[in-house]
Amino acid sequence: MDIFDRLKSAAKADWTSYVDHAFVRQMAAGTLPQAAFRTYLVQDYLFLIQFARAYALAIYKGRTLSDMRAAKAGLAAILDVEMDLHIRLCGRWGLTPAEIEAAPEHAATIAYTRFVLDCGVSGDLLDLHVALAPCAIGYAEIGRNLTPAGADALGDHPYRDWIGEYAGDAYQEIAMAARRHLDDLAARAMTERRFAELTTLFAKASRLEADFWQMALNDGTA
Amino acid sequence: MDIFDRLKSAAKADWTSYVDHAFVRQMAAGTLPQAAFRTYLVQDYLFLIQFARAYALAIYKGRTLSDMRAAKAGLAAILDVEMDLHIRLCGRWGLTPAEIEAAPEHAATIAYTRFVLDCGVSGDLLDLHVALAPCAIGYAEIGRNLTPAGADALGDHPYRDWIGEYAGDAYQEIAMAARRHLDDLAARAMTERRFAELTTLFAKASRLEADFWQMALNDGTA
Amino acid sequence: MDIFDRLKSAAKADWTSYVDHAFVRQMAAGTLPQAAFRTYLVQDYLFLIQFARAYALAIYKGRTLSDMRAAKAGLAAILDVEMDLHIRLCGRWGLTPAEIEAAPEHAATIAYTRFVLDCGVSGDLLDLHVALAPCAIGYAEIGRNLTPAGADALGDHPYRDWIGEYAGDAYQEIAMAARRHLDDLAARAMTERRFAELTTLFAKASRLEADFWQMALNDGTA
Amino acid sequence: MDIFDRLKSAAKADWTSYVDHAFVRQMAAGTLPQAAFRTYLVQDYLFLIQFARAYALAIYKGRTLSDMRAAKAGLAAILDVEMDLHIRLCGRWGLTPAEIEAAPEHAATIAYTRFVLDCGVSGDLLDLHVALAPCAIGYAEIGRNLTPAGADALGDHPYRDWIGEYAGDAYQEIAMAARRHLDDLAARAMTERRFAELTTLFAKASRLEADFWQMALNDGTA
């Protein structure tokens, strides 16, 4: 069992509240209101800006050139790839880049992103990456859960683009790399006493992810 | 018009949503459900722990011994005075210190506190103190608003202790000092272009304060 | 007069002690002991690792996507270009990458790099970029000073590679961009009271650069 | 063997270069030039300002109220006690507070203090306290080494005040508390792989302390 599985298992209820949230189940069933998805997309774009800052923080906190270069790749994946993907996805849903960037950050967006950044500044790289894990690694798990018969079987599913993105090989590999990196950091710096603290942190981050889905659901069905 | 008045005026709608929130109006009228107040008290205690960290950050960021000593006084006011007051207030409402410290931080608590800390780390002392102002200075304004005939006229108002605390001379003087300090920082480092950015920051912090009241109201009337 | 010229002019003595240091003059004359240059090259490589961290900090502190992307370009210039150049230059001087990375950081290297990082964490982006300026922009000035007749006239000058690098168009353009960026930051956030503080900071950074040359000169002639 | 003894033993050469430095031996023998001591006193005062910032950082990074309160006591010991002692000591050596505060920070002062602050920001509390240990705990060892027959036997030793201060019970107890705290942090967060990294960090900090003595010796005999 790697450190990610240990954390999930130790924070089972909070983890499940996130990966099995009504937003996810409605997305899977194709019944998620479009307004909820649109709210999600916009807030997730604002979310990614803060996540890019978290990867920049990881570069700054790197102790070796190889750590710094790995974090720089993570940063580039967000700034150069994932944000463009959001802009394209948003376009398909009738949202212009200008609309997205002008949107105010929702409290749920602020809560999770600033929590991650604070974990990273006040703790060490392991704290930072544990706080990032529900997002960075969790999205790959959600993508896989939503494609039990493979991404090709999605047909004309209304949320095919999103699901296909995170179920796809490219993102699955990014998540696997993040998982191995977390395991390396834990091998380097994790005592069993820290595991208890990291579980608390991971549980909190998972709850904040669940709150993020809920925010989109509330706004989109208001 | 000092910088605090300029910020309030420029962010009028968000400021009003905070200082004139239903939670505050129901507290004034004495109709606020006790459960809402209890939720507030507990979360505000957890909030103060993070605010103490923000003042520690201000010491760390101080450029002169006198700045550092001023921020240290602010830190001591929280750790040595205000937190004890909360413990006493909580006691009167039947909450033990153990219950308070074991309570999970609500997302609304995380959102405002981590937002302030992030403003402080990523910006300068002026950014930090503008983000702190809705709380540090705003509570004095709320206290005064709730005692138009003076604190002595509160009689057996159910929220007399809380209102009296923030309407009282001691807290009013703390808030006046924070206001003068903010004005000094602005005289030193505020250009008009920064004023626009600081207004955005102040508006966001005010909205997060309003969300904090709302969270207590929701939990307390659930 | 842009902000960089104002800073140089206000901190003239410290600036001159850096750009007109004996190390620079001996390099120009081709009389600099090779051992001094070798010490410099190794320490400058360790220096660049910390400077890459400073640019990562600038990304983290960015307020807009465009600020973040600009700082990311600066980071890439160090990690992907300038460090490779050092490895190549070191190779010509008989130093292997392994030797360079195993070298202990000299106190003069620690002093300037950690000073810059501390300015950046404790202050704002303008503080950070003023602390970086003697290096980022100053090297272009030194390169130009050492090629009054153009880089092509260097002939078989023993330090032709280094001088040509910083006198060359590519680096001159990087420095010009850094200069414009500094001017933008100043237009946004610099009051006249801050100018006095920034001058102190700039003078200190220039002295620490002069100490860095001196360290190489001392070690190389010991 | 507690963690402090393990670190000293693993970084023996660097530790000895610090605690047994010529500055210390000349102070013990009473032959240290007064000018060297005066340079030391002034720079150590500037040093303490940065150390106060390091303790503020420790409060900010605290995970529990009790950690935060302990760090606050460390901060108060510097700002309220040790700095006043320096002002008094300086007064006996003919230095006014104005002279001290106007003195420029020496590169050796910048190197150690900013190194400590950077360890603290980029790492966790254990990194920060390991970087602080050569100063916080080392001074007690030096004080004891210089009083083999007890502080009372110092007679009219020219450096009696300084030696007596650090050999005295009050400082010895502060150092013992710092040592126990370091041991607690290590029990919480130290793996054996981290021990190797912490040893590198501790060795570097010890060398920077040795450089600090050397700077005073150089200036005082110039």
Image (cartoon, coloured by chain):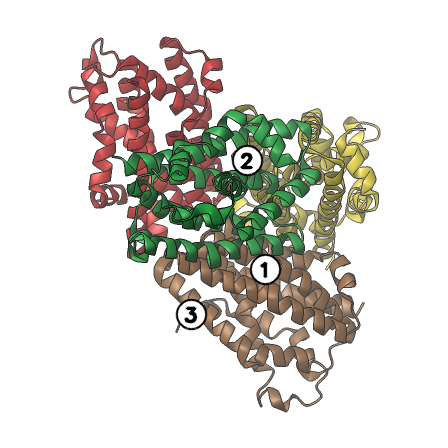
Chain colours: A brown, B yellow, C green, D red
Secondary element type, mark 3: helix
Q: Earlier along the polypeptide chain: callout 3 or callout 1?
A: 1
Residue D28 position, x and y percent, is 20, 19
Between the residue at mark 3 and the residue at mark 2, the CA separation in whole angstroms equals: 36 Å
**Residue D4: x %, y % from top left:** 27, 41
What residue occupies the far left of the structure in this picture?
D149
Residue D178 can be seen, yes or no: no
Q: Residue at x 78, y 32 (%)?
A: B144
Residue drawn at point x = 83 percent, y = 42 percent: B12
**Is C169 positioned to the left or the right of D112 in the image?**
right
User: Mark number for residue A51?
Assistant: 1
Assign a secondary structure to mark 1.
helix
Kind of residue indicated by mark 2: Lys
Measured from the top left, where is residue A214 in percent x and y?
69, 67
Q: Is residue D171 above or below residue B111?
A: above
Residue under the point 65% across and 64% down: A211
Location of residue C182 in the rendering, given as x and y in whole percent from the top left corner:
62, 42
Q: Chain of mark 3?
A: A
Whether label 3 touches label 1, CB < 8 Å: no
The residue indicated by pointer 3 is A180
Name the chain under label 1. Answer: A
- Label 1, label 2: how far apart the Cα atoms are: 24 Å
Q: Which mark is residue B61?
A: 2
